[in-house]
Amino acid sequence: MIGEAFINLRRHSLMTVAAVTTIAVALYLIGAFALMSYQANVATNRAASEFEIHVYCREQVKKEAIPAIKKRLEGISGIRSVRYISKEKAFNEYAKNLPIDTRGIPNQFNETFVLLLKDPAKGSQIASVIRGWHEEVEEVALPEAEMGGLLRIMSFLKYLGALTGALLLIGALLVVSNTIRLSVFTRRREIRIMQIIGASPSFIRLPLFIEGLIHGILGGALAGICLAVVNHYTQGLIESVIPMLSRYFAPIDMKNIAMQSVAVGALLGAAGSLLSIHRYLRLT
Amino acid sequence: MNLWLPEALFFGYTEGQSPVYIFILPVMIELSRVSVTYKSGDVGALSDVSLCIKKGEFVFLVGPTGAGKSTLLKLLYRDARATEGSVNVLGQELSKMRSSQIPPLRRQMGIVLQDYGLLPERTVWQNVAFACQALGQRGRDIRRKLPEALELVKMAHRCDAYPAELSGGEQQRVAIARALVNRPPLLLADEPTGNLDPNTGAGIMDVLYEANQRGATIIVATHDKFSVDRLRQRVIALRGGKIVRDEPCGGYGSEAGD
């Protein structure tokens, strides 16, 4: 049966090539966008987790007041977590690194809160809010502002990737479906003869289904290879051009991509041919 | 029936089925007050047709174009449905049949159509073998049956040729071989010599006649006056969707009269 399908694929080789390459292009684009979306998501999350706001309290603030301040900080919308570093702890951390310089020097550190945000883009906004608490807060320290802009781009890419991916998936499905439809049309004589001699419907449908499946698998494999190769080079490229950014991205396993691409291709091929066979192959 | 021929050449002996059962069944086809009308207008392809065909008969269906010959044949292999009446083929009532039962029905008969219906990208051998493969038969059985079928139509020497390399008559012979390879008890032929010159056509009719001699029931719809007059078998003449003549050793008759 599978052998039959391969023979048929070779007979209509031009159509097979057309279908496989179209599916490969679609799957490649889907994969590229999916990867982009995935990386954007990972980067966003990592950057968000590294985005810390340091709040330095005034010297007059007493230890008893700390819990209240902490609760107030937690209450601000957009705060993921608040961590309290007492002035003693801060001093000890500092002293650990520079033991000679700090011997005998009084502790001039403030009571510190380290804030983690849900959305780094709101960082400056939250910081100005906290700066407004003049009684308790002496200073609020933010990481560089450029992070915000970059992260907005990432967010955009994430949604773009998902949307485009979905559209391309539908497109690829239509391609497979149409290819099988063409197959059915091209082979209508053969199908008619099969009906006349009394072949069962599954005997007629099965080769077409297998062909659609193979189209999908081959397209997925081709796309997977291209994705893996391109990904390898772009990772190297990003690392050399924007080293600061690259640490946010997750490493991608090329074999994994290729296999997933083949799997998606197979699913696509199966679904598309089932759809098409059901709609266009009328066997009374 | 020539009882001295080897059993494998007997028609009606479908694999796994006892030949005795088939021989008991005398009536192959029975139509009872069958009408076929199309929804588009009052065109009646067939009206109130009744006939009975027994095992081993050779029947010519004749008549002018549009008289209903093809429609009648299509009823027999369920390519068309009767709007009225009952169609009984090989013991099965076709009008009540579900779509899923059509393939098994067709497996019990051989069908030869006017346009040969050969697959262009396969050789003669592969084309005839196709009829066996589509029914899931094993390679060993196929290799056993094919030479006999090709010998019957005298095309064994061209078994590796492609249809494009064959003349019309040769292609039609291959189509007949394909229809006969599984030794069906019934063979239906719709204008098998329609595209062929008279002599080639005569050759085709002889093949069908020989198959009949070996036990197959044959029904041929045809315009071929020459062969009908020559073979003098049962002739059923149709005109305007009705049977106008049914003779045991008939001739073609005239188009205008009878």
Image: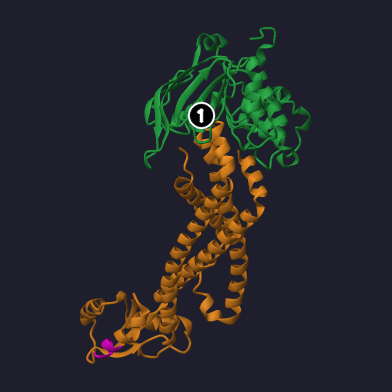
Chain colours: A orange, B green
Which secondary structure is most common in the magenta stretch?
Answer: helix
Q: As drawn, which residue projects farthest toward the front? A: B257
Q: As drawn, which residue projects farthest toward the right? A: B157
Q: Quadrant of residue A112?
A: bottom left
The answer to whether one can see residue A193 in this image is yes
Q: Secondary structure at mark 1?
A: helix
Instruction: Identify which residue is drawn at 60% across, 57% down.
Output: A20
Q: Name the foreground residue: A3 vs B55.
A: B55
Total marks in image: 1
Image quarter hosting the N terminus of chain B? top right
- Residue B80 at what x, y percent from top left? 45, 33
The answer to whether one can see residue B211 in this image is no
- Residue A263 at what x, y percent from top left? 53, 53
**Where is mark 1, residue-wise?**
B73
Q: Quadrant of residue B176?
A: top right
Circle 1 residues within 10 Å: few <14, some 14–19, many ≥20: many
A74 over A273 or under it: above or below = below
Instruction: Identify which residue is drawn at 28% across, 90% down.
Output: A131
Q: What's the chain of the residue with tag 1?
A: B
Whether residue A172 is in magenta: the answer is no
- Residue A122 at what x, y percent from top left? 33, 82
Q: Name the foreground residue: A39 vs A179.
A: A179
A227 over A184 or under it: above or below = below
Q: Left of B50 or right of it: where is B21?
A: right
Q: Name the foreground residue: A130 vs A249.
A: A249
User: In the image, what residue type sits under mark 1?
Assistant: Leu
A132 over A231 or under it: above or below = below
Instruction: Identify which residue is drawn at 55% across, 27% down.
Output: B62
- Residue B248 at what x, y percent from top left? 55, 15
Q: Magenta region: which residues?
A: A128-132
